[in-house]
Amino acid sequence: MHNIKELKIWTKAMELTVEIYKATEKFPKEETYGLTSQIRRAAVSIPSNISEGAGRNSKNEFRQFLSVANGSSYELQTQVIIANQLNLLNDETTDALLSKIEEIQKMNYGFQKTLNSTKQVVVDTSNLKSQ
């Protein structure tokens, strides 16, 4: 298990989620159950899956949740671009958000690679005698 507050990727994903909520505050009311909801759900999914994976019992499970978080980051990336093309987000906000999303994607990839490369040590205790 990992302490999520110590995971930089989780902290960055939390910051991005807050920024997404702020960026979508002024979306038109007719988008409340459309793009606004989709963007916010994708953003929330990133730190949520990172934290759920951190609480799992194995690196394999953690990697799976990191993979889901990565998928959500690509979904969010697409939705931010759509919002920009619909003139719901200006270019400056879009560029800033996309930059942060890409940073999280790179961190996620690196973290998964690290989890793949670290060996799990198994200690054989069957021949230890209690004293």
Image (cartoon, helix red, strand yellow):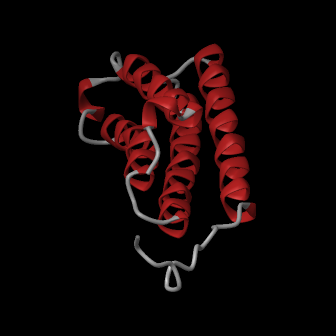
Residue at screen point 49% across, 85% down: 126
The residue lying toward the viewer, choosing from 129 and 16, is 129
Quarter of image, res 47: top left
Residue 114 location (% of width, % of height)? 72, 54
Quarter of image, res 57: bottom left
The residue lying toward the viewer, choosing from 97 and 129, is 129
The residue lying toward the viewer, choosing from 29 and 37, is 37
Q: Does 11 appear above or below 68? A: above
Q: Residue furthest bottom?
A: 126
52 horizontally vs 117: left or right: left
Residue 106 location (% of width, % of height)? 72, 43
Residue 90 location (% of width, % of height)? 58, 17
Counting the numbered discs, the total is 0
Q: Does 117 appear above or below 4? A: below
The residue lying toward the viewer, choosing from 1 and 97, is 1
Q: Does 100 appear above or below 47? A: above
Q: Check the picture and name the quadrant holding the C terminus.
A: bottom left
Residue at screen point 50% across, 78% down: 128
